[in-house]
Amino acid sequence: MASTAKAVESVISAAWGKPQSWTLDSYRSRGGYDGLKRALTMEPAAIIDEVKKSNLRGRGGAGFPTGMKWSFVPKDSPKPKYLAVNGDESEPGTFKDRYILENDPHMMLEGIAIASYALGVHTCYVYLRGEFKFQAERTQAAIDEAYKAGIFGKTMLGKDFALDCYVVRGAGAYICGEETALLESLEGKKGWPRLKPPFPAVVGLFGSPTVVNNVETLASVPPILAKGAEWYAKLGTEKSGGTHLVCLSGSVNRPGVYEVGMHTTILELIHDDQYGQGMPKGRKVKAVIPGGSSAPVLGADELDVALEFEALKMKQTMAGSGGVIVMDDATCMVRSLWRVARFYAEESCGQCTPCREGTPWQTRLLRKIEEGRADASDIDMLSNVASSIAPYPPIGLGNTICALGDAAALPTHSFLMRFRDEFEAHVREKRCPFGDHPWGSF
Ligand code: NAD
Ligand code: SF4
C-alpha cells in the first residue's frame, strides 16, 4: 500500500535519531523548556485547566484524563505531595517509553517540572523497570544536566520553587507497573497492589497524595504548555487530544514504534508505507491485539478502526499501552493464548485467589488443548475459569484487587469468542491443526 494515511504532526518523536537528541543543548535548540517558562508565569490551577482542555489522556494503558487526575490532588494537604513516573514498561508488545528515555529524556523531565509546579510537588521519583539500565543512566544524565541548569534543585528557572528528582529501578516484576504496587515498591516493600479506592491521588506514597503518570503522558505536557491546549486538542479527536506512540510487532514487514494520530486505523498502521508496510509475502492477517496483551483480540474483519480509546472501546477492546501485535494466518490461536496465559500466571503476585489459582489453571487447560489431550468440556472449563477471574464483557469488572486479573481473563474470553472454532478443531483432531511450530515448545 502506498502512503495514503493522513499525515501526522510529530509531537513526541520529532527529534528521535537526530545527533545528541538526548542532551539539554539539543532540547533547548528545539524550544525545549519553553513550556515550563510559560507555566511558571501561570497560576497552578490555570496549568491544570490547560491540561484538562488539551484532552490529554494517560498513555500507560487506562487512558484516564490527565488534567482530571491532577485535579483530584487535595490543594491544602498538610502532608507532602509526590509525583511518581511510571516507567515500568512491561506490558507484552509495549516498548515505546524506552524510546523517549533514550532519545529525548528532557521532554519527560520538562513534563515533570510542569506537573510538579502545578501540583505543589517537591519530590519526584522516576520508577523504571529493572532491565532499563541504559535508559536509567541516560535519564540520570539528563537529570544531572537539569540540576546544573537550575531547572531542578532549590529553585526552578529562577523561581522560588524547589524540586528534587530521583531515578529508581525496579527488580523485574511486571506487577510493579500497577500503580499501587509501584508505590509499595518505592516504599521498599514487596510489590503487592493495594485496594482502590483510596486512589493514589489522595492516599499514595507514604500515605501522601501522589500522582502516578506514565512517561509518555508527561512527555506530552511540554508541547501543550508551549503551543496551547487548543492546538493539542485539535490534533486528536473530540475525547482524545494529541498524537500517541504505538508499538507495532508481529507479522508485519516493518515493526517499530510509530507516532500516529488518534484517527489512524489498525489497517493503516499495518499496511501504510509510513508504518508497517504490509504483511510478509503470502501471509494474511488473522488477528490483532490492539493495546498490549491485556487487550481483547480483534479478528481480521474488525481492523478498520481508529487506534483510539473510544473507538476501540466500541469494539469491546482497548487502546491500552499502545502495543499492537499482528498475527497472520499461520498462527495457532490456542498456542498464542497459551503463551499469553503463561505470562500472567508467572506474573500474578498471588494476593487474591481468583488470580493466583485461575491463571495457572488457564495455562494447564490451554496446554492440554494445544497438545490434543482435551475434550469439549475443557473448552467450557477454560471459559468458566476466566469468568471466575473477571467476567465478560470487559472494562474493569474483575473479581480481584488489581487489573492483572482482568488482563489475564480478557484475552481468554476474546480468543474464545472470536476463534472458538480453532479450539474445537484441536479437540476434534486431537492435535494442533497448525502442526509443529518452528520455534518448538515454550
Ligand atoms: P484504572 O482505570 O484503575 O486507573 C487509571 C488511573 O486513573 C489511575 O492512575 C487511577 O489512580 C486513576 N483514577 C481512576 N479513577 C480515579 C478516581 N475516582 N479518583 C482518582 N484517581 C482515579 O487503571 P489502572 O489499573 O491504573 O491501569 C490499567 C491499565 O494499565 C490497563 O488498561 C493496561 O493496559 C495498562 N498496563 C500497562 C502496562 C505498561 O507496560 N504500560 C502494563 C500493564 C498494564
Ligand atoms: Fe495480585 Fe493478581 Fe490479585 Fe493483582 S489480581 S493483586 S496480581 S493476585
Image: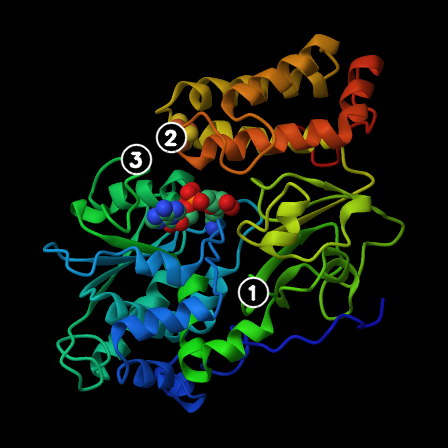
The quadrant of the picture occupied by the N terminus is bottom right
Give the image quarter of residue 22: bottom left
Residue 78 location (% of width, % of height): 10, 55
Q: Mark 2 points at which residue?
A: 401
Position of residue 117 measured from the top left corner of the image (x, y, whole percent): 24, 72
What residue is pinned by disc 1? 244
Can you name the residue that lies furthest to the left here? 78
The kind of residue tagged 3 is Arg
Return the mark for residue 194.
3
Point 63% across, 17% down: residue: 382
Measured as percent of width and height from the top left, residue 235 is found at 59, 74
Horizontal arrangement in the rendering, residue 106 relative to residue 358 (left or right): left
User: Is the distance from the Cβ of mark 2 to the nearest ligand 2 atom less than 8 Å?
Assistant: yes
Q: How crowded is mark 3: few (under 14 residues within 10 Å), some or many (20 or more)?
A: many
Residue type beneath disc 1? His
Query: Which structural element holds mark 1?
Result: strand
Contact, mark 3 vs mark 2 (Cβ under 8 Å): yes
Label 3 vs label 2: CA separation? 7 Å
Q: Are marks 2 and 1 in contact (CB under 8 Å)?
A: no
Q: Residues within 10 Å of mark 1 (few under 14, many from 20)?
A: many
